[in-house]
Amino acid sequence: MKLSAKLIYFITGSKLAVVLLFILSMPFLVARIASEYTNYSLRDQQKKALDKVQKDGIDYYLQGDDSYGSYTMLKEEYVAIEPAAPELLIDTIKTVERIVEGDTLSYRVLNHTFKAKNKNYLLEIGKTVGSINQYNKPLQRIALYVLMGLIALTIVIDLIFTRVLIRPLGKIIESKLLNRKFPFKDQSKPVKTTTQDFKYLDESLISLMDQINVDFEKEREFTANASHELMTPISILQNKMENLLADDQITEDVAMRIVGMMKTLDRLKKISSSLLFISRIENDQFVKLASVKLTDLLEDIKEEISHRLEDKGLTFSIHIKEKVTLKNVNHDLLFQLFYNLINNAIKYNVEGGSVMVTDAFNKQGDYQIFIKDTGIGIASEDIDFIFDRFRKANLSENVGYGLGLSIVKSIALYHNIDIKVASAVKQGSTFTITFPQVMLG
Amino acid sequence: MKVLIVEDEKTLAYEMETFLKKAFYLCDLAHTVAQGLEKIEVNSYDFILLDLGLPDGDGLSLLPKAKKHNPEAAYIILTARGNLEDRITGLDLGADDYLAKPFSLLELQSRMQAIARRKFNVKEEAIPLGEFSIDLQKRLVQYKEEQIELSRKEYDLLSYLFLHKNRVLTRMQLSEHIWGTFADDDYDSNYIDAHIKNIRKKLNLWAPTDWLETVRGVGYRIKK
């Protein structure tokens, strides 16, 4: 579930719970408020009555009688003053049931004793409670409607707010993780946000990428330097051997041994120069400005490579339907890419096998080239590693040193070309090379 | 022809000298930019082989000054750096060719000869090769007046062997010359043998090719 959805669900849930609790506890709350208010108004009445007595004397109420009593018209309130025992001292507010003219009414009753003219009196003020409780139901209903409306309103606000709040997270993921192609050449800009946590995440990712870049840069530099440093000693050895081989005094046997040494040295030379080549590609040392007609390129490769077909009696066919020109590419690198793939298809083929190059547009409008061979195939457990440097599937000996496909991978990465392999052991492999639409001229 | 080798790696300079001497070049050695300039100021060379990473500076910095003293010379840059920029700068500064280390001395000599033909206008008539003749300028092999149809690679192979006549060239050296960086490392393959077979077949129609020898376990040689 999305974070924003979770947040909305949680916020809504907690709001609903609070509202529900409020609605349920409403009768109690209302009763409570009503009784507080009743108490207050009873006290107010008491004060008024006592003030009157103070000012005008007790006779203002008694009018010569022993006691005084008065009900309002609807029996909602009443006041009574009657003599009390001299020592009696009461000051209470209670809820009492009274039967008035046949109706049982619940009253909140204040009892208060006071002295007037040296006599003790009891003041009693009552107020019905029922008149308050009957409002509970409609009150609850109205409160429910109002609160629900408010909840709906706040959810809309919450939705908008969480969207805005969480947006930087999406931006961070998009700009730092999804849309970044390794190596991270250009410095990534921090995502604008006032949320401390996102800033922290963003900064951490930036520093992580910087770290990766530094390490990658070091590795690249090492590869370049190491292979470069190897070139001089290899040069010396190669030239020494060449001179030695030309020496008239050496015997046939020695000559053969020197040739053996030269082959080994040549292998070393090829590995070093392949590594150097890869690091040059990774260092952007090739310009991508050429336009290349694929049919021409493939024909050139066919001519260059055809002598390799004879050994195993292979057939090599190119069936290109589309007239495609690739733009902003490096011709030599593209040549090398196809050459290596086709060369592999030949190298790992079986007696009398075939290599076929076809093409098509895929659904997205990208252009694809398929190189299909009838070779020994790649085991599924190896297929993820075939583009890695020096990884070699457990094939027969004498099958290269695992840099051909690494070169292919660097060239593909450099041009934003996608390469996929499908393969089955003893049935052959198909390499699918996908050129994004933007490369097509 | 007089050659100046500017190379700080002494063993390498020495090997180049040994090789070129055998091909009848006169060689001088310099190991620093300063030494190189000194030699260029007093002598006149046909070829100046220039390493780029020298202890007292970049070989490229030497190029413009050297050209002032010795404008007729052909300059070949030799470097292990091999990046595109160096190559372009070198050629912009007037270098005639560029060889990335490690290179074969055979290749170096072949480039020097090509430059000589091009730059010094060395007019070579068709040179006899057994009963045939080879015209390096026109890239032709002829029997008397008859032109023999060789493929580009077959001609390259034959002319390379001819250029280094009396020297055994290994299959590896020959493949590297013909296929360059695309030469594969499957050394036991017989691509070269197949080409040689074709050359012999085409030539044998006209005259014997016993001057083109197979040297067992090593390679091929043109003997004269």
Image (cartoon, rainbow, N blue to C red):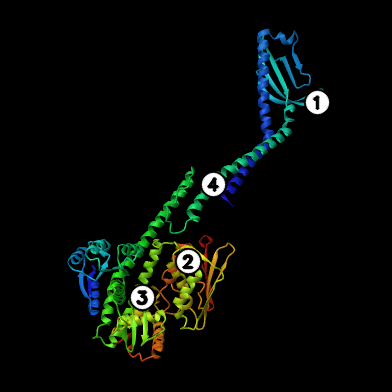
N-term-proximal mark, 2 vs 3: 3
Assign a secondary structure to mark 2.
strand
**Front tag of 3 and 1:** 3
**Front tag of 4 and 2:** 2
Q: CA distance from mark 3 to mark 1?
A: 116 Å
Assign a secondary structure to mark 4.
helix
**Residue that lies at the very extreme toward the right in this rendered image:** A102
Q: Chain of mark 1?
A: A
For the residues bearing labels 1 and 4, Cβ distance under 8 angstroms: no
Q: CA distance from mark 4 to mark 2?
A: 46 Å
Q: Chain of mark 2?
A: A
Q: Name the amino acid, label 4.
A: Ile
Q: Nearer the viewer, residue A198 or B148?
A: B148
Q: Residues within 10 Å of mark 3 (few under 14, many from 20)?
A: some
Q: CA distance from mark 1 to mark 4?
A: 64 Å
Q: Where is residue A263 drawn, in percent x and y?
A: 34, 79
Q: Nearer the viewer, residue B43 or A305?
A: B43
For the residues bearing labels 4 and 2, Cβ distance under 8 angstroms: no
For the residues bearing labels 2 and 3, Cβ distance under 8 angstroms: no
**Front tag of 4 and 3:** 3
N-term-proximal mark, 1 vs 4: 1
Which part of the image, by quadrant, shows the N terminus of chain B? bottom left
For label 4, the residue is A166
For label 2, the residue is A292
**Front tag of 1 and 2:** 2
Residue A95 position by quadrant: top right
For the residues bearing labels 1 and 2, Cβ distance under 8 angstroms: no
For label 3, the residue is A267
N-term-proximal mark, 4 vs 2: 4
Q: Where is residue A121 drawn, in percent x and y?
A: 69, 14
